[in-house]
Amino acid sequence: MQPSAPLPVNRILAWLGVAVLVGAVLWALAPVLTPFVVAAVLAYVLHPLVLRLQRWGLPLSPAVLVVQLIALLALLGLALLLVPVVLREWPLLRQQLPGLLDRLDASLQPWLAAMGWPISLELGDLKAQLSAWLSDNREDWMAPLLASLKVGGSVALSVAGYAVLVPVALFFMLHDWQKLLASAFALVPPRWQPAVARFASDGDSVLGEYLRGQWRVMLALALYYSAGLALFGLDLALPIGVFTGLAVFVPYLGYGLGLLLALLAALLQFASPAQALLAVAVVYGLGQLLESFVLTPRLVGERIGLHPLAVILALMAFGQLLGFVGVLIALPASAVLLVGLRRLRARYLSSALYQSGGDSGSDAA
């Protein structure tokens, strides 16, 4: 019997060392690479639209500019949904804040007494400070704001730098996307290129299904939150509902911001704080259940081949490992990982190890 060739241990250790070194460099340069990663993700999402405009006869550079303009207008449209909310709620908040805090104190005191905590909330100083901050004298609160910007100048400069760098990087990535892919593919050893090409094609198909499913989830939630808030009589149901539905693309953050806006609008509109809390709790509680257990598993999970329980597990696992960024990339990363696991399973089932194990098992039987 011919002895099997020894495992290339040195080669495996070398590849592991290279992987660890690359991971350490990426971890150290994460703040610098963040705008480029954001631009790369946007370029991947928007590049099919550039190709479609080119098929319609538009040259490459104008097509890239048109796509960037469309993306910018979409982001501005999402931000402008907040304008009617701010314009309406800011004066009401300034006028009704003292009475709102009094009603909150009156509502909480019986509940606290029933719990055995007869505590009276001293809200006088808080009302005075908040009323002064919300007053028409902008200089009182602009001065601390400017001072905080001086203290956190590096953060402000970073945000401004990202606002400039991301569009610039996005333009060049969209313009040279095919060249970048070809350059990266050329680095793959020739004997691995067919397998890498098939894997990339499968991953691209799965990610496309994910994006289309996520878009359907956003539209369904925008309709649900708008209709749900309108049924409770909220005047700003449409802008808050549409904003919440579209912002859920950023997990937790979009939902949380929409919840705060709806709660503020309800407290300022309804006479009873209990009515406001009940309306927002019902709409947003059912909305979270609808998103987590129905829409995302069905419209996203099934389209990329993930079981509903696997979707929930992926969100929790990536969130635990990478925090907010992990939640953001949980489903697309799981989709790509699923492609790799399918290929490994198929390779194992066709391997000599599996076949020999099956033969020995049947012989033993």
Image (cartoon, helix red, strand yellow):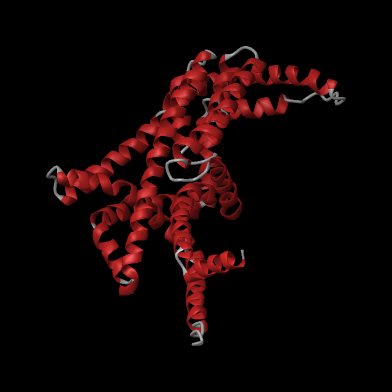
As drawn, the residue found furthest toward the bottom would be 2
What residue is at 44 percent from the left and 64 percent from the top?
A: 350
In the rendered view, would you say 72 is above or below 18? above
Residue 322, how many percent across, how many down? Answer: 56, 54
- Give the quarter of the figure containing the C terminus: bottom right
Residue 330, how many percent across, how many down? Answer: 51, 49
**In this orientation, does residue 7 appear?**
yes
**For this rendering, which residue is in front, 310 or 181?**
310
What residue is at 31 percent from the left and 52 percent from the top?
A: 170
Residue 192, how many percent across, how many down? Answer: 35, 71
Report the label total: 0
**For this rendering, which residue is in front, 211 or 249?**
211
Residue 351, how many percent across, how many down? Answer: 46, 68
**For this rendering, which residue is in front, 166 or 138?**
166
**Left or right of 359 on screen, residue 73:** left
**In this orientation, does residue 85 appear?**
no
Q: Which quarter of the figure has residue 95? A: top right
